[in-house]
Image (spheres, rainbow, N blue to C red):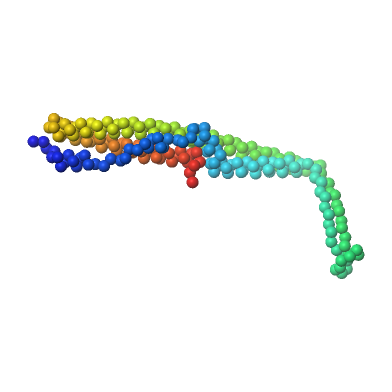
Amino acid sequence: RPLATPLEMAAFAAVPLAPAGDLAASAAPASTLAAATHNAISSRPELRQLEAAEHAAAAQLRVAHAARRPSLAFGIDAGTEGIDYGLGRKYNYTTASLVATWTLFDAGARAAAVSQARLADRQVRNEQQLASARVELEVSQAYDNLLTTAESLATARARASAARAAFAIASRRRDAGMASTLEFLDARSALTSAELNENLTRCALLQRQIEFDYARGDSP
């Protein structure tokens, strides 16, 4: 007599399966690698911070250069004067002035300020280039990981589908008394393993999608 009863077989077959869906297609990147890289370069906060620092360094360099040039200032003063307060021709005065300033010798102080500002500007530019290269690498790696995991999910789904078909055959053979309980349990174990691998791969694909979204600057 078969060891497995129909009730036991129904219990094995009643294990719920995760909905398959088209997760691989939905998780595939909506943009190309070039578009994702461009979006990351324009929206990643660390690059925006370095861009603002570069603008500040460039402005400081312009100020240092301007300090070496002669300056010309024009001013107008107006008011009242006298031993008491009053208004009129005896009290009001207006003064205009034109002041030219040109420092001929400062012991190299302004030249040193220009060199320091130029060095700071160059340093920020280098940091900006390194950060951009790092972001491009992150996007490329996240993109490749996402595609690889999507392909792995397709393989896992095919394996689970084959395991379901094998389990259905084993179930029919078991019902007909043509297969042993051990063969039936092996098919059930293979199906469980395949479905578990499929669900784990789904979770990995969702994680890769999150990493890709962050890399291209789409995270909140």
Numbered label tally = 0
The answer to whether residue 180 is visible is no
Work out which residue is located at the far bottom of the displayed protein and give it: 84
Q: Nearer the viewer, residue 120 or 11?
A: 11
Q: Residue at x 75, y 43 (%)?
A: 67
Left of 15 or right of it: where is 75? right
Q: Residue 172: percent from the left, percent from the top?
A: 17, 33
Residue 96 position in % (x across, y down)? 86, 53
- Work out whether 18 lies above or below 151: below
- Residue 24 drawn at (x, y percent): 38, 35
- Residue drawn at (67%, 41%) of the image: 58
Tell me if 148 is positioned left or right of 32 in this view: left
Quarter holding the N terminus is: top left
Whole-percent x, y for residue 43 in the image: 54, 41
Residue reaching furthest to the right: 90
Q: Is residue 106 visible?
A: yes
The residue at 78%/41% (across/down) is: 69
Quarter location, residue 143: top left
| 80 over 197 or under it: above or below | below
Instruction: Please tell me which residue lies in front, 61 or 204.
Output: 204
Residue name at image x 35 percent, y 38 percent: 21
Q: Residue furthest left?
A: 1
| Rendering quarter of residue 167 | top left
Corner quadrant of residue 118: top right
- Judged left or right of residue 124, residue 109 is right
